[in-house]
């Protein structure tokens, strides 16, 4: 009888210790503990990884608890961050629900496809190699990723996102657009994206370009010339006259219509602006010194706006610069129609 009582007592103590370990506070210390559970890991490997990281006090007890509760086959791979003192039950709950650490990759609007892949390559949590997609093929956005995600797979998500947005917008497009394909819409949207950093101006800039295309007027957009020079890399200076005169396929001063390809990856707002532009009769715009632009319907109005911008330039530099930029082109130059462009490189 005494032996049985002793065994019962020991059993009760063991159960009490087990319950206390499972539901009580876990190991102490400072800061969260991060553990990466690989895909395909079994229960024993998971328990050992948690034990080594000092997340739980007993791999054996964790294994038994997982088997007893049916969680053994429901534990999910991924990167986890457990707070100091988290109970074993809480640890189990988080892994069972797949509450993994979320990371984010942001591709800004207006970057080239090459630059977008460079952003993916700089992410320390991603793996693998992503190819450079065609220009304009991705949707600039902030994407949630997990540690170990393949860069090519993340890039595919970005391309799929662009397709969804473009398909939705194109299905409800204006019926009198001066272009006929989705890719032409992306090309024009990429030019609009590079022309203004002011979100509210996108529809108005898009309308100017749509009006110019309808009337057969060259777009005369600085960013297209930049793309022909550096494939969209910032020049860090104004455009030179020699660059404006260079007969590249992307020079919209020398060539009418759209560029052969997009010059960047436009965001959803720029796509929407060109696919459903507002009705205006404006044909020109030039920087206004505030970060935005002054728009005009007539050449006379535009010339007045250009003159004001020239005064602002002289006031900020002390003298007229030597670099020529289309945004300040005047009617006295060989270019027959004053520029619509901004000063953005």
Image (tube, rainbow, N blue to C red):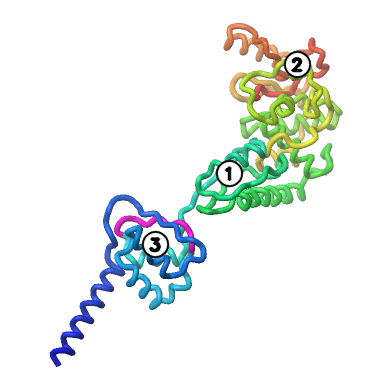
Residue 81 belongs to the span the image colors magenta:
yes
For residue 258, which quarter of the picture?
Answer: top right
For residue 271, above or below residue 303:
below
Q: Residue placed at 62% from the left, 6% from the top?
A: 319
Q: Nearer the viewer, mark 3 or mark 2?
A: 3
Please tell me whether residue 222 belongs to the stretch shown in magenta.
no
Q: Which mark is residue 49?
A: 3
Q: Report the side of 143 relative to 210 (left or right).
A: left
- Which quarter of the rendered picture does the C terminus lie within? top right
> Image height check: is 200 above or below 309?
below
Farthest bottom residue in view: 1
* Residue at horizontal 76 percent and vertical 34 percent from the top: 279
Callout 1 touching callout 2 (CB < 8 Å): no
Q: Earlier in the sequence, mark 3 or mark 1?
A: 3
Give the class, few, some or many, for how many residues have Cα within 10 Å of label 3's Cα (few <14, many ≥20).
some
In this rendering, the count of numbered labels is 3
Q: Residue under label 2, please give it.
A: 242
| Image spot of residue 163 (x, y percent) | 71, 50
Location of mark 1 (residue): 120
Q: Quadrant of the N terminus?
A: bottom left
The residue that appears at 37% across and 64% down in the rendered structure is 91
Spot occupied by residue 60 in the image (x, y as percentages of width and height)? 33, 71
Span shown in magenta:
77-85
- Figure check: 114 above or below 149: above
Percent coordinates x, y for residue 135 in the rendering: 71, 39
Q: Is residue 330 left or right of residue 122?
A: right
For the point 43% across and 70% down, which residue is it? 43
Mark 2 Cα shell of 10 Å, populated few (<14), some (14-19), many (≥20): few
Residue with the most extreme top position: 319
Give the mark nearer the N terminus: 1 vs 2: 1
**Element on which disc 3 rests:** helix
Circles 3, 2 touching at the beta carbon (< 8 Å): no
């Amino acid at each position: 009888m005494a032996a049985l009582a002793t065994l019962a007592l020991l059993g009760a103590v063991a159960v009490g210790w087990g319950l206390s370990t499972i539901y009580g506070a876990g190991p102490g210390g400072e800061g969260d503990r991060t553990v990466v559970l690989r895909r395909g890991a079994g229960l024993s490997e998971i328990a050992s990884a948690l034990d080594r990281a000092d997340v739980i006090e007993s791999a054996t007890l964790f294994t038994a608890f997982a088997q007893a509760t049916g969680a053994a086959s429901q534990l999910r791979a991924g990167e986890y961050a457990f707070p100091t003192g988290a109970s074993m039950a809480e640890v189990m709950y988080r892994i069972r629900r797949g509450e993994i650490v979320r990371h984010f990759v942001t591709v800004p609007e207006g970057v080239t496809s090459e630059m977008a892949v460079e952003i993916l390559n700089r992410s320390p949590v991603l793996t693998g190699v992503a190819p450079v997609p065609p220009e304009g093929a991705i949707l600039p956005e902030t994407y949630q990723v997990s540690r170990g995600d393949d860069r090519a797979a993340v890039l595919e998500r970005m391309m799929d996102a662009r397709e969804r947005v473009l398909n939705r917008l194109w299905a409800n497009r204006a019926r009198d657009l001066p272009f006929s394909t989705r890719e032409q819409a992306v090309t024009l949207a990429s030019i609009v994206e590079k022309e203004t950093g002011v979100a509210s101006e996108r529809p108005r800039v898009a309308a100017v370009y749509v009006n110019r295309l309808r009337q057969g007027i060259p777009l005369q957009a600085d960013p297209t010339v930049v793309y022909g020079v550096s494939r969209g890399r910032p020049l860090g200076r104004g455009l030179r006259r020699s660059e404006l005169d260079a007969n590249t396929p992307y020079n919209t001063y020398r060539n009418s219509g759209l560029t052969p390809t997009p010059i960047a990856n436009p965001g959803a707002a720029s796509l929407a602006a060109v696919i459903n532009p507002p009705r205006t009769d404006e044909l020109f715009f030039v920087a206004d010194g505030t970060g935005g632009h002054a728009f005009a319907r007539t050449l006379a109005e535009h010339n007045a706006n250009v003159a004001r911008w020239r005064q602002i330039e002289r006031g900020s530099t002390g003298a007229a610069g030597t670099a020529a930029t289309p945004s300040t082109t005047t009617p006295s130059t060989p270019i027959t129609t004053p520029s619509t462009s901004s000063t953005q490189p």
